[in-house]
Amino acid sequence: AIGPYRLLAALPAAAGPDPAVRALLEPSHAELARTAEAFLDCAGQASRTAQALGIHRQTLYYRLSRVEQLTGLDLDAGEDRLLLHMALKSARL
């Protein structure tokens, strides 16, 4: 693993995901998790994210609002974005 992934891989498995993102990581919310990860991977650029996912921007905005409702995180806040991004990445390690 490289960079931040090395840090994530070094965390004890017992730590688990942050409580704020647990619900998002449930299989029933896989599409929302995929949308959030794509948005964060695209540096928060809505047009680029919508294009990458093959969806309309309004659909993206709706899904992101659902992510915020589900997690209680503010995707306009850098620390919340970082928390969510790292939780989504570590869930796949």
Image (cartoon, rainbow, N blue to C red):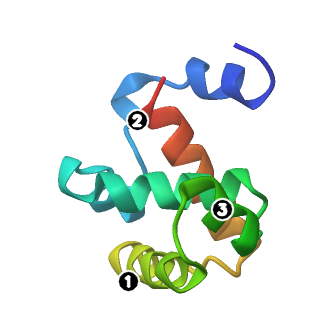
> What distance separates the C-alpha of mark 2 from that of mark 1?
24 Å
Residue 69 numbered mark, or none: 1
**Mark 3 or mark 1: which comes first in sequence?**
3
Crowd around label 1: few <14 · some 14–19 · many ≥20 (10 Å): few
Q: Residue at x 70, y 73 (%)?
A: 46
- Place of residue 30 in the rendered image (x, y in percent of width and height, measured from the top left): 31, 51
Q: Nearer the viewer, mark 2 or mark 1?
A: 1
> What distance separates the C-alpha of mark 3 from that of mark 1?
24 Å
Q: Nearer the viewer, mark 3 or mark 2?
A: 3
Picture quadrant of residue 17: top left
- Place of residue 41 in the rendered image (x, y in percent of width and height, measured from the top left): 70, 50
Circle 1: element type:
helix
| Kind of residue at badge 1 | Gln
Q: Which residue is mark 2?
A: 15
Q: Nearer the viewer, mark 3 or mark 1?
A: 3
Q: Residue at x 45, y 84 (%)?
A: 62
- Place of residue 81 in the rendered image (x, y in percent of width and height, measured from the top left): 66, 64
Residue found at the far top of this picture: 1
Q: Is residue 16 left or right of residue 83?
A: left
Residue 6 higher or lower than 58, as above or below: above
Residue found at the far left of this picture: 28
- Place of residue 53 in the rendered image (x, y in percent of width and height, measured from the top left): 55, 56
Circle 3: element type:
helix
Q: Which residue is mark 3?
A: 51
From the viewer's side, name the closer residue of 87 and 31. Answer: 31
Crowd around label 3: few <14 · some 14–19 · many ≥20 (10 Å): few
Picture quadrant of residue 57: bottom right
**Mark 2 or mark 1: which comes first in sequence?**
2
Crowd around label 2: few <14 · some 14–19 · many ≥20 (10 Å): few
Q: Residue at x 34, y 28 (%)?
A: 14
Residue 27 higher or lower than 24, as above or below: above
